[in-house]
Amino acid sequence: MRRLALTVVVAMLGGLALAADHNDPNSINSIFSDIDVSAADLYDMFGWPSDDGQNVILALTFASVPKTGVFDTDMLYRVNLVPNPRVARSAEGWSLDDLIHYADAVKDKYLHLKGAEVRVKVTTGQQAVVDFIDFPSGSFSKTVPTNRVLNVDAPDGTPIKVYIGGRDDAFFNDLPGFFRSINYAPQFYKVPLADGADRELKIPKTLLELEGNTLFNYDAAASEWGRPGGFKKDLPPGPHTWTGNRFAKDKDGNYRFVYSGKDAQAGRNVNAVILEIPLRFITRTPDRDRIVDAWGESWVLKAAHRIPTIPDRPRRSFFGRIGGFFHGLFGGKVNAYQAELARYKRIDTDGVPFADAALSEREDDRQLGATNIKLARTFVRRFGHLGWGFGPSVSALGVGTCFDHDNSPVSVYKTYALAIEAFPRVKKCLFQPMNMPDDSWNKKHLNIPLRQPFEIFIPNVNAIDMDTTGTWPFGRRLEDQVATRFLSVFLDMRAGCGGKPCNVETLSQQSLWDSLPISPKTPPNPLHNDKAFLDHFPYLADPW
Amino acid sequence: MVSTVGALYIVLTLLASGAVTRSSDYDAELQRIDTQIAEVRSGGEVGPDGLPRTTRLAALMYRRASLTADFAQLREAETAIEDALGEAPSAQLVLLRANFNFKMHRLQRARADLASIPELADRAAVRTLSAQIALQEGDYAAAGKAYEAVVKDVRSWDSLASLAYWRAHTGSAGAADALYLEAEDEITAKEMRSYAWVELQRGVLDFDRRRYHEALAHYRVAEGAYSGYWLIEEHIAEVLGRLGRTAEAVEMYQRVIERTRNPEFVSALAAIVARSDPARARALYAEADVSYEAQLRLYPEAAAGHLLRHWLARPESPPTRVLALARLNVAARPNAEAKLLLAKSCWKADQPAEARRLVAEVMRTPWRTPEIIAFSDEIRSARTAQR
């Protein structure tokens, strides 16, 4: 999950200074505990097939803490892999119940299915301990130096490429523009990142500035407001709402775009776990299992395991000891990996890009990774809320939207208590196939169905299709401009672009913006990374 | 002239003697905060996180003062908070002040602060603070309900620990320990001080049940988790005293006193050495008297209870003044513990009927501590003896 750098989190604060005269758990912490960027903060889960389609390339990136190429030794990172056959789903005429049933079925699968995992911890000597766990040929472990490209041979001889180290951040994005589109106060105002009220203000989401929305509209006299290295303003007294009724236009009659197209991530580094694994190592049936679901997790060592403690478990009975004996005989190494994980606490997950920022509202309790299934209703409601904002702004530009907003002339702030109320508005968006700009993604020209948003976002995994180039949503390649492609989810794929189909790259076309009554005339996000990617492993560019 | 072997011996001895000593976790944290304070003071008006300098300074100074429990530093922190509120008021700063007021036992002010930030009312931090205020006001039922409601919504380590404390003092020590254990499981290796604090509480649970060896074991774990913290060390000193390991207790108290000059520990050391070295005890008590008076001038509500215990532990203490202070303490925190101290003050001032009335009032609450039970037994035994 991509987070803001240098966020300030409001933490609970108790009240004891004096010698333990009453209960004060957080006696020392502060409301404004500065939580610097954490090594547990995951950024991106890239994944795509190698050019010959034989290998899966995976890159889990995260905050370069304590510094680029140096790893926090309390951390444990997991890249989870579940191979699947490709399933063609027809969601024609689906109801909300059908969607929930789909989510339940996927939940059951992920909660009970055992996939494989690559687990990485780094020692105090900055050696990476890489465990390959539960692959079809078994499990094995290697200790490797960090910041070096390595070829690791599995016990069965399978060559696996490994890189654990610092790289250039491969994410290129106008993040301030995105936050402007959702009226996200902490980006622009001195609002500590707290739960609730002062994050997304109760102003309609929008791609076009709202007339009179002085809380967020671009200020030419303060061009660095809300930008990296810029400044933030004091949040004026409330209410923090918008009472206008139309989009803003300049003197030329153009709408003002909330995006700038500038890369706010330029010049940044990440730490990364990068792997290139033959598909035949991930599944015994590579001809059948053409999809590899991948997601990343970050875990932090629990405090209790930093130091020797008093054993807390009660003494076992006679039968308890007998049971333990047999368990130890047959439990095997699998339990050792589970036991290791029990010493850690999961902090972050990453699968689909923007599933968190856009759809999960960054709430910590919604970071469930592949098991985000229980959030299906939340997603429908959230999609409805976003649709009332983005839908009218797409329509105002003369582009067709899949969201039913009753021809509203302006973005609307609306939330839903019930998914069933939102569903009719969003169902076309959720179930429309996402058109691709051409056939280059389908390099073998197979009968591969286009993906639909409901199956892209649930479960929250990077579903890599090995018979494609792995461009989003068939994976995620480094060069994919996923933020702009995410916005395309709100386009009418069937006939929204001048009566013709739109596609996932529509909003990245300069020609589109040149033709629209908008300023600046730019795709919302940069089209390329600040540094060229490598054409060989580890693919992400060298760090700055 | 020193031979080569001799020089090597000298070098090895120096190294072995710890000439190069490692900073404790506590000292390292203080140093980090000091460095951050210096950076904020010399930096721009707005930090990289977008917060104004005064706000950052207030937060850091509060954190430092909370760590040291130094009253002078707490006063500086309060000034910094007020300055920050004057320059760039925010709900978060008001919540910081609410916590400060609670810390200094100024419950009404803390309540008023919370009431002025209704937009934060749903936050777990605010709900827990409200529960803690209720507990200090003696509304144990409301406090318990509130703690449980927070835990139902947010099973964070601090909400679990808050509920654990309430359970520990309302007759469910076993449940309390289970909650503390669950709280520990939520704490990561990035929060060792928090872990140490919870482990300390587990030790206090055992201490209250007179399981001193078990208590010491927990305190040692806490010390291992977060070294050099006076709060842990003074608990270790206390339990060493109970275990009859007097010399070790004295040494530990001396170490803590050297670093904190906290009158509570000066007084505790005085009590230990009173029999063997009465002159030293008198000097220590005198030192504690002066420090306590200084604290009382700065924050009377916060100092009152501790000064009361200091006086009640000594055979010679001015009964009128003790009573006055005890009444001030109850006025600030009308809870069972404050009423117990008032009862003890009445007992010492030869007002047994009032003492008994207060104890009966305390026993009607669900709040139980070893001190409450012991004093209740004492005055009941005294009444029986009189008959």
Image (spheres, grey):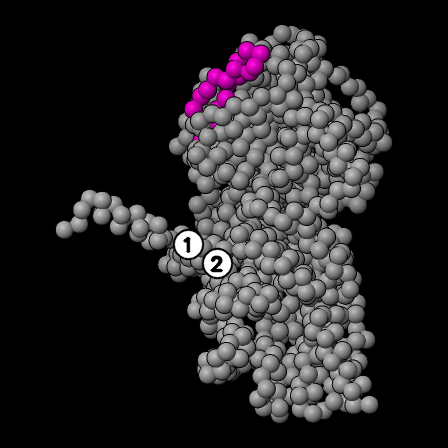
Depicted B67 relative to depicted B309: above or below:
above
What secondary structure is marked by label 2? Answer: loop
Q: Is residue B78 left or right of residue A107?
A: left
Mark 1 touches mark 2? (CB < 8 Å): yes
Q: Earlier in the sequence, mark 1 or mark 2?
A: 1
Q: From the top left corner, tell me how far across and down residue B229 is, in percent.
A: 50, 60
Q: Is residue B81 left or right of residue B184?
A: left
- Residue under numbered circle 1: B23
Same chain for the residues at labels 1 and 2, yes or no? Answer: yes
Inspect the image, locate mark 1, and give the three-letter code of the amino acid beneath it: Ser
Q: Is residue A164 magenta?
A: yes
Chain that bears disc 2: B
Question: Which residue does the image show at 78% across and 64% down from the upper left?
Answer: B171
What secondary structure is marked by label 1? Answer: loop
Query: Is residue A367 among what the camera can see?
Result: yes
Depicted A46 relative to depicted B167: above or below:
above
Which of the 4 image quadrants contains residue A507? top right
Q: From the top left corner, tell me how far across and down residue A497 is, in percent.
A: 65, 24
Inspect the image, locate mark 2, and give the three-letter code of the amino acid beneath it: Gly
Question: Which residue does the image show at 36% across and 53% down from the upper left?
Answer: B18
Task: Tell me the magenta residue range.
Answer: A148-173
Chain that bears disc 1: B
Q: How far is the residue under mark 1 from the one under mark 2?
A: 9 Å
Q: Is residue A317 left or right of residue A282?
A: right
Q: From the top left corner, tell me how far across and down residue B293 is, in percent.
A: 51, 83
Question: Which residue does the image show at 55% across and 23% down from the upper left?
Answer: A141
Query: Is residue B91 among what the camera can see?
Result: no
Q: Is residue A137 magenta?
A: no
- Residue under numbered circle 2: B228
Question: Which residue does the image show at 58% across and 21% down from the upper left?
Answer: A140
Nearest the camera: B126 or A146?
Answer: A146
Which of the 4 image quadrants contains residue B301? bottom right
